[in-house]
Image (spheres, helix red, strand yellow):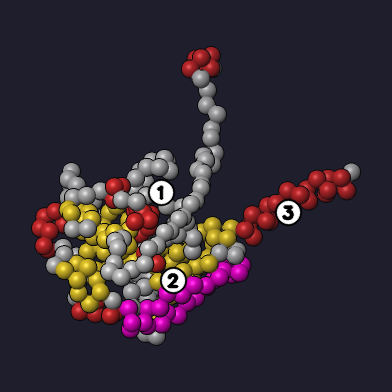
Amino acid sequence: MKIKLLKKLILPILLFCGSFIYAQSVTGVVSDASGPLPGVNVLVKGTTTGTQTDFDGNYTLDNVASDAVIVFSFLGYKTQEITVNGQTVINVLMEEDAAQLDEVVIVGYGSVVKKEITTAVVSVNAEEFNQGVITDPTQLLQGKVAGLSIYNKGGNPNSNGTMRLRGISTVGGNTEPLIVIDGVLGQSLNNVDPSDIENITVLKDGSAAAIYGTRGSSGVIIVTTKSGKNNQALQINYNGQFATSTIANQIDVMTASEFLAAG
């Protein structure tokens, strides 16, 4: 009797233990040569799961696969990719990358070299965008810009994301950042195919967005789409992906007649 009971319990126990092996929490501290580094973007590669380090450089990622790759990125530092390999604590030492400071950044008044900028400006190019199944251009920036919150109000996977930069600056008004697409103001990111975007620049503080006046009170997001270049050979790119989204736990509720019968 005991042997039969043990055999029946072996499979559930193995499945229970396997769930912990597959998905786990990863924590750690990100620092540089001078100490803990706050605001570092921590992202699970190939997904939109990510976070940022706090003031003390700490971070926590939940439900991370044991073979996942975690990407650590921050302005002025080299991007690092580390494979989890079942680890639950991963501490990272970031290395400075002076070459990033020579990049050209698009701002409201034109294009300037990044090292000459004294305002809060973040530029994200196509190579740094989130990969995977992208249904909304806002998903390209999730976890990439400090202070930029992107979320969906409902459970519809096809719904458009809501963006908040520096929190809510007005009561009852438009609290989303001003969108500028190829120099045209007041556009919607939903009008652009995510694969057509070449670069996105986020102007976060008042001085950077001053040229846009009150329309830029909640920040400005400048989108540059891909275009042909002089002496460039013909290029044809194709990218196809398929994904589904299902309800994790659908509750079986009573009908109106069952509710009345139950009293």
Between discs 1 and 2, the one toward the N terminus: 2
Marks 3, 1: nearer the viewer: 1
Along the line of sight, the residue nearer the viewer: 126 or 217: 126
- Residue 99 on image: x %, y %: 33, 82
Secondary structure character of the magenta stretch overall: loop
Residue type for callout 2: Phe
Query: What residue is rendered at 40% in x and 78% in y?
Result: 78
Give the labeled residue for mark 1. Answer: 135
What is the residue that sits farthest to the bottom in this orientation?
Answer: 33
Residue type for callout 3: Leu
Name the element at disc 1. Answer: loop
- Residue 27 on image: x %, y %: 50, 67
Marks 2, 3: nearer the viewer: 2
- Residue 167 on image: x %, y %: 25, 55
Residue type for callout 1: Thr
Query: What residue is rendered at 51% in x and 59% in y?
Result: 62
Between discs 3 and 1, the one toward the N terminus: 3
Residue density around tag 3, few if under 14, some if 14–19, many if 20 or more, within 10 Å: few
Name the element at disc 3. Answer: helix
State whether residue 136 is above or below residue 213.
Answer: above
Give the labeled residue for mark 2. Answer: 72
Side (left or right) of 174 relative to 96: left
- In this orientation, does residue 152 appear? yes
User: Disc 3 versus disc 1: distance between alpha carbons?
Assistant: 36 Å
Which residues are drawn in magenta? 77-100
Is 78 contained in the magenta span? yes
- Residue 229 on image: x %, y %: 29, 67
